[in-house]
Every structure is written in structure tokens, then in C-alpha cells.
């Protein structure tokens, strides 16, 4: 900086060292600013979504452990009390045989 003879150049260099944007010949890059703003908003939304999912999964795990314990107890008691067998839920084969031949139109 001692080598410089022009006072304006010295002032410009000093200002540029303090604040880069103050000595810029161009204005603010609006497209870049908008892009960065959208990116920050998207990242914040992703962070919020991740936190919500983590909270929801913790709640489901806590609730799921209780539900699983209750459902395993109830399923054991239901099957032995009712006496249902697999034969009660069988579908007759006559329904499936009648649909095996497709209806086709002849010209």
C-alpha cells in the first residue's frame, strides 16, 4: 500500500479491506439472493419435518409397545374362546370355476 501514489486508490483498497460489498462495482446479485433465501427456507422446512417425524416415531414406538402387548394378549384369548377353525372361512370353489371362462364376443 506504500507503493501506491494515488490517494483514491489507497482509500478504495482500505474500504475494500473493511467491507467488500461497499466497494463493489455491481449491485447485489438479486437472483443469487433469492436462490439463497429459498434454499434457507427449504432447509428450515426439512429440519422441522425431520423433528416432527422423530417426535411422531417416538410416540408411535411408545404407543406401539403398549398396543403390541395388548394385542398379543387379546389374540391369544380370542382364538381359544371362539373355537373358530379355518374351515369356517373357506371359499367355495364353485365361484372361482364359473369365472374361469372369459366372455368373448364373436363377429
Image (cartoon, grey):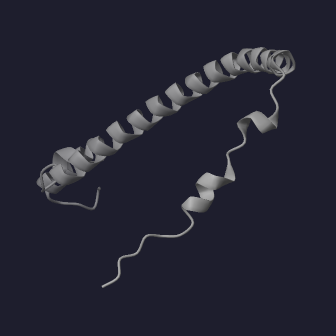
When asked about the image quadrant of residue 68, the answer is top right
Q: In which quadrant of the rendered image does the C terminus lie? A: bottom left
In this view of the protein, can residue 99 be seen by the observer? yes
Residue 42 in the image, given as x and y percentages of width and height: 36, 41
In the image, taking residue 92 as reference, residue 4 lies left or right, namely: left
Residue 5 in the image, given as x and y percentages of width and height: 18, 60
In this view of the protein, can residue 29 be seen by the observer? no
Q: Nearer the viewer, residue 103 or 63?
A: 103
Q: Nearer the viewer, residue 7 or 88?
A: 88
Residue 69 in the image, given as x and y percentages of width and height: 79, 17
Furthest toward the bottom, the residue is 107
Residue at point 16%, 56% (across, down): 9
Question: Measured along the vertical axis of the image, is residue 75 above or below residue 40?
Answer: above
Q: Nearer the viewer, residue 60 or 21?
A: 60
Question: Measured along the vertical axis of the image, is residue 20 above or below residue 4?
Answer: above
Question: Measured along the vertical axis of the image, is residue 6 above or below residue 14?
Answer: below
Q: How many marks?
A: 0
Q: In which quadrant of the rendered image does the N terminus lie? A: bottom left
In the image, taking residue 49 as reference, residue 23 lies left or right, namely: left
Residue at point 56%, 24% (across, down): 56
Residue 14 in the image, given as x and y percentages of width and height: 25, 47
When asked about the image quadrant of residue 58, the answer is top right
Residue at point 23%, 60% (across, down): 4
In the image, taking residue 80 as reference, residue 27 lies left or right, namely: left
Question: Measured along the vertical axis of the image, is residue 1 above or below residue 73?
Answer: below
Amino acid at each position: 500500500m506504500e507503493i501506491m501514489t494515488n490517494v483514491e486508490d489507497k482509500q478504495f483498497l482500505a474500504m475494500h479491506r473493511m467491507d467488500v460489498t461497499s466497494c463493489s462495482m455491481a449491485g447485489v446479485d438479486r437472483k443469487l439472493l433469492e436462490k439463497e433465501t429459498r434454499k434457507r427456507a427449504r432447509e428450515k422446512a426439512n429440519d422441522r419435518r425431520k423433528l416432527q417425524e422423530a417426535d411422531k416415531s417416538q410416540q408411535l414406538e411408545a404407543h406401539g409397545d403398549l398396543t403390541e402387548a395388548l394385542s398379543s394378549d387379546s389374540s391369544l384369548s380370542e382364538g381359544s374362546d371362539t373355537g373358530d377353525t379355518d374351515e369356517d372361512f373357506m371359499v367355495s370353489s364353485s365361484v372361482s370355476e364359473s369365472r374361469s371362462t372369459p366372455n368373448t364376443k364373436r363377429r
